[in-house]
Amino acid sequence: MMERTENLSPLASSPHPMVTCHMAVFTFAAFVGLTKWRKWNSRRHLKSQGYLVSGAKWFSVLVLFSYINGFLFKLFPTCLFSQIHGRWHTVPSCWEEEAKGKDRCWYEAALRDGNPIVVYLHGSAEHRAASHRLKLVKVLSDGGFHVLSVDYRGFGDSTGKPTEEGLTTDAIRVYEWTKARSGITPVCLWGHSLGTGVATNAAKVLEEKGCPVDAIVLEAPFTNMWVASINYPLLKIYRNVPGFLRTFMDAMRKDKIVFPNDENVKFLSSPLLILHGEDDRTVPLEYGKKLYEIAHNAYRNKERVKMVIFPPGFQHNLLCKSPTLLITVRDFLSKQWS
């Protein structure tokens, strides 16, 4: 059973971080295209077909960059006024019948029932109602979890413009809102893909405040967004284009798009569970392994860090279909919270 709870407090919006990236790459590609046209014009003995291919190549760079932009922040219509954040609170399935027709106050009170709570931070594409996310929520609900599914600013029906800082702020506020209403019930931050970067950013800030999160689950994590973007499958074919990577990375650096999981985990003390599919081609398994290695080396209590690798068949989005996912998560959290 799902119900949309109250909206979060209005958050300040900020300029979209990818505008500079778009302009930088567009200018760079336009310059290269113009240069090639001049060369073609001055060397008429060369075949124009080759330059048409070259021009198409740089046009495809622009198209590709728009696609990669979607990998970072999927754009949706935004609002110029105060931000509204969409959330769903899914109660444990054992409460399904009783929850029907209940108001927001009932749902808030239910957070104190002793069942563990997951704040779910989704990946870059679509919104909280994407099919694979609904499947995961159902798995967790059937396993006795409350699940708060959140759309960050600029995603789904949430207003505002997405930035790394903004997404992190949203996650922190949802976590703090939940903790303020959950009593002694533990709350876990669960991030998937891009959401892993949001989760560790938020967890680090809360750690610095002296309020470490009760647990963190990172599903298909990367080390940091720079490495993930450079090695993104569709971008690999352009890595050898002179100047492209430098332009791309300079733009990301200027707009402060990092999501440094590899640095964040060095400062955490919360129980940390890393989940990764062996055949994940979007965020390769090697990133999850590297992040686990960094975290395991940094944590004083090694038992607080665990990685579970799932066999082929689940790829990037479908760990929710694994028959062992729920028991893996429950066993880890039960041990950490006992």
Image: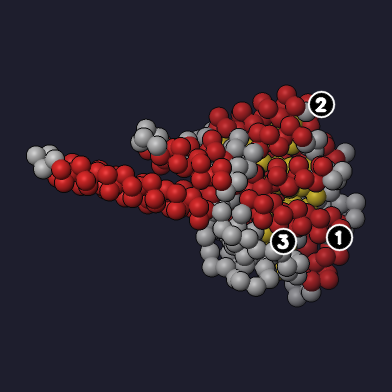
* Residue 188 vs residue 37, the one in the foreground: 37
Answer left or right for 202 relative to 59: right
| Colouring scheme applied when the structure was drawn | secondary structure
Query: At 83% across and 65% down in the image, what residue appears?
Result: 108
Residue 91, compared with residue 80, is above or below; it is: above
Amino acid at pointer 3: Thr
- In the rendered image of this protein, does residue 303 appear above or below residue 337? above
Q: Which residue is mark 3?
A: 90
Q: Residues within 10 Å of mark 3 (few under 14, many from 20)?
A: many
- Report if residue 166 is visible in the image: yes
Name of the residue lying farthest toward the left? 45
Please name the residue that numbered disc 1 is placed on: 181
Q: Are marks 3 and 1 in contact (CB under 8 Å)?
A: no
Depth check, mark 2 against mark 3: the one in front is: 2
Instruction: Provide residue 71's location: percent of width, then percent of height.
Output: 50, 49
Tag nearer the camera, 3 or 1: 1
Using the image as rendered, state which of residue 293 and residue 39 is in the foreground. Answer: 39
The local crowd at label 1, few if under 14, some if 14 to 19, many if 20 or more residues have their Cα within 10 Å, is some
Q: Amino acid at mark 2?
A: Arg
Total numbered labels placed on residues in the image: 3
Q: Which mark is residue 10?
A: none
Q: Residue at x 65, y 73 (%)?
A: 81
> Camera-side residue: 62 or 323?
62
**Is disc 2 surrounded by few (<14), some (14 to 19) or many (20+) residues within 10 Å?**
few
Tag 2 residue: 300
Q: Tell me where residue 79 appears, x and y as whole percent.
A: 60, 71
**For discs 2 and 1, the disc positioned in front in the rendered view:** 2
Residue 311 showing in the rendered view: no
Where in the figure is residue 178, as x and y percent of width and height?
Answer: 81, 57
Quarter holding the N terminus? bottom right
Cα–Cα span, label 2 and label 3: 35 Å
2 or 1: tag closer to the N-terminus: 1
